[in-house]
Amino acid sequence: MSCPICKKPTEPEHRPFCSARCKDIDLSKWLIGGYVIANDDESDSSEVEPEAGDPEV
């Protein structure tokens, strides 16, 4: 298996990456929104409904 970031062979301790550096690069991409997971739900997930008992803002 090759590293999804740099395509080098993976190392068992960092699998599926080759190094801690590539793991950190991948994490960074998730945190800044570089990766997204498709949502087939028709409702807008950005709208959060208040739970019962929560005061309205």
Image (tube, helix red, strand yellow):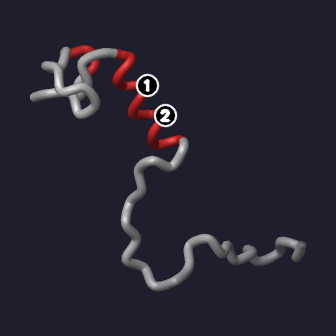
Residue 56, by quadrant, is bottom right
Q: Residue at 37% across / 77% down in the picture?
A: 40
Q: Secondary structure at mark 2?
A: helix
Check disc 1 and report the residue beneath it.
24
Q: Residue at 19% across / 15% down in the picture?
A: 11
Q: Amino acid at mark 2?
A: Ser
Above or below residue 13? Residue 2 is: below
Figure label count = 2
Q: Amino acid at mark 1?
A: Asp
Q: Residue at 45% across / 85% down in the picture?
A: 42
Q: Residue 55 at what x, y percent from top left?
A: 89, 73
Say the numbered circle drawn on residue 9.
none
Residue 46, by quadrant, is bottom right
Check disc 2 and report the residue beneath it.
28
Residue furthest to the bottom: 42
Label 1 crowd bin: few (<14), some (14–19), many (20+), radius 10 Å? few
Q: Residue 19 at what x, y percent from top left?
A: 30, 15
Q: Residue at 76% across / 77% down in the picture?
A: 52
On screen, residue 48 versus residue 55, left or right, reads: left
Q: Quadrant of the C terminus?
A: bottom right
CB within 8 Å, label 2 to label 1:
yes
